[in-house]
Every structure is written in structure tokens, then in C-alpha cells.
Amino acid sequence: MARKQRKSKSQSVAVHAVRGRAPARPSDAAVSRVLKIPAQVLEAVAQGGPLEGVPDITATRLLLGGLVALFALIALSLGAAVLLQDDGSNLHGNEAIVALAILALFAGLGGGLWYLLRQLANAGQGSIRIDAEGMRWGDPALPQAVAWNEVCRTRSGLHDVRTEFVSSDAIVKRLVFHRTVGASEDAEIRLPLALTIDTGRVVRFRNRAVLLRALLLRLATQPRPRLRFAAELFIDAGIDPETWEPMLAPRRWMWFSSLAALLPALAVIILWPVGEHVGWMVAALILAMVMGAGAMGWFMHQRYPGLQGVFEFETPSGSSP
């Protein structure tokens, strides 16, 4: 009986934390946040069957068509500039270099146009499928796949499922989790939060929100032991970790606070005295960015104290997606 009461108390603290209310006592703050997935959510996933991504072909073609028009306009403008140029007396002695530069530029534009036209012919040829066994995504002719029983805990770090931003890799955040590849090894799986691998073929899926919710539910329920989810993931995904309903406000506030965090660095650039050593300016920029990031983190913690740390999930007895 005492064990049952302690378990109920732990779940109550977790629910209050997610809803934005601080724990009643400081000692309770250390309790792991284990949330129970509502039975009706799991039943809806189980009864819905497999999910297929629905490519937005119109948006993809509009994007590619716009890029083709832009490249063609640049090429025509450069061609007209060459034909309408003056006698070229100021280019004497550099004709070969100028000709090579023009040829290289036109070759690059031509290659870009050829690539975009090929992508335009393949618009919509991307897929994702989520079912009870696993997930397949990418090129329909050669898809990537993972089974839910292959998903595992990471052997290093605090989070098994998280989002990351790598500027050298992409300009969007990626969903990261792990799969077993051997007796003592695991490998990372990285997916854009848009769930599209090749935006030239599929710029977005019309049912992206439903797909992402189903994917996270499968990760939260299938593997054992329980996976550890970074709280920021649910902000990025726009999903309430308690109810699994849409939750867009925290993501909007995160974007707002991220932009506001750049203001100190912008102030340094605008107000920096002319003639001061550039090294001091770099140091001031770094300090301003650190201060901005700290202020952003403090703001989000104050506004959403329950969306911090690590979440784990458990299902009601007898329920499975």
C-alpha cells in the first residue's frame, strides 16, 4: 500500500511540473518525471493502423519552379549584359580570365537548372510509413528502415531521444534517437523534424504533425527499458507531453526569445567605437551572445518550468499502441 502511495505521489509531481506549476517541496524537484500516456491516445494509435506520409506535390513544384525561374532570370540577365557591353577597352590583357569566369558562371547556372529540372520531374517521390513494426522513409525505391525493437538507449549522454541543430548539416533541427547495430554498439538515426529527407522531391508532408506524433508515441512505448526524452523535443515538435495534444505556444515563445537573445550582439556591432581593436570587439560579441543565451534560458524556465529536464513514459496496464 505504501509503495502504491509513493508511486501516485511521484506521478502527481510530474503532472504538476509539466503543467507549469513548480513542485510543492524542493526535495520533490529531483524526482524523475515519469508520465503516463493516456489510454485513449494509445487506443487511437492502435485503431488507426499504419500511417503513410502525404507529399505536398503542389508546394514542392512551386518551390522548384520558382528556383528554375530565378536561375533562368540570372542567366538571361548575364547574357544580356555580355551582349550589350561596350567595346571592352578596359578589359585589354584580361580577356582570357574574364572569358573563363563567364564560362564558369554559365556552367554553374546551367548545372543548377539541369538539377532543378530533374528534381521537378521527381516531385513527390518521397515517402514515410509508420506502423506497429517500425518505420520506413526516404526514396521509395530504396527506403531506409528501422524496427522499433532495434531502438535502444544511448550508451553516453542523458537523452535517448532529442533534437539537435548543426549549422554545417542543415538549417533545421533534427530528431535524433539510437538503434542497435551490434552486441556492444549503437548508431544514431537523424531525421529532420519535417520528416523529409530530400526537399527537392518533397518539401513537406501534409500530415507531418500526425506522423511526428505517431513516431514519438512509438518511441515512447515500444522499446524497453524506457527511453529518456529531452523536454526541448516537445517544444520543437509542438506536442504536450502530458496529453499528446498540439502545444504551439512554447515553440513560438522560444523563437521569440531566441531572436531577442541576439539583441545584445547586435547592439555591440552597432555601438562599437570606430578604431577600437577588433579583438576586443570579438570578445564583447562572445560575451553578449552568452548573456543573450542565458537570458533566453532563464525566460523559458520562468515561463514554462515544467518543460525542463528529462521525461520518461509509461503506459496504462494492458494498453499498447
Image: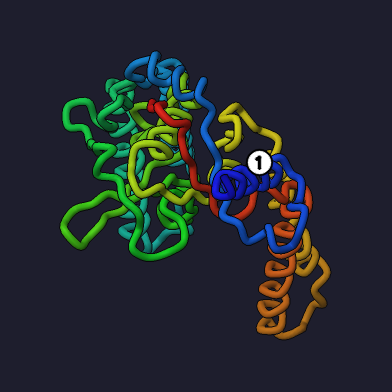
Left/right of residue 89 with respect to residue 116 in the rendered view: right
* Quadrant of image for the C terminus: top left
Question: Does 247 appear above or below 270?
Answer: above
Colouring method of the image? rainbow
Left/right of residue 25 with respect to residue 82 in the rendered view: right
* Quadrant of image for the N terminus: top right
Q: Can residue 244 be spotted in the picture?
A: yes
Choose between 35 and 165: the one closer to the eye.
Answer: 35
Q: Which residue is mark 1?
A: 15
Residue at horizontal 67 percent and vertical 59 percent from the top? 29
Residue at horizontal 37 percent and vertical 62 percent from the top? 94
Outermost residue toward the front in this view? 1
For badge 1, the amino acid type reads Val
* Percent coordinates x, y for residue 208 in the rendering: 46, 26
Left/right of residue 31 with respect to residue 204 in the rendered view: right
Residue at horizontal 70 percent and vertical 35 percent from the top? 249
Choose between 167 and 62: the one closer to the eye.
Answer: 167
User: At numbered mark 1, what does the secondary structure look like: helix, strand or loop?
Assistant: helix
Question: Does 255 appear above or below 279?
Answer: above
Residue at horizontal 40 percent and vertical 27 percent from the top? 318
* Percent coordinates x, y for residue 264 in the rendering: 78, 64
Question: Does 22 appear above or below 37?
Answer: below
Choose between 182 and 105: the one closer to the eye.
Answer: 182
Splitting the image into 4 quarters, where does residue 220 fall? top left
Instruction: Give the number of marks.
Output: 1
Choose between 260 and 146: the one closer to the eye.
Answer: 146
Q: Residues within 10 Å of mark 1 (few under 14, many from 20)?
A: some
Left/right of residue 305 with respect to residue 135 in the rendered view: right
Q: Can residue 79 be spotted in the picture?
A: no
* Percent coordinates x, y for residue 245 in the rendering: 59, 27
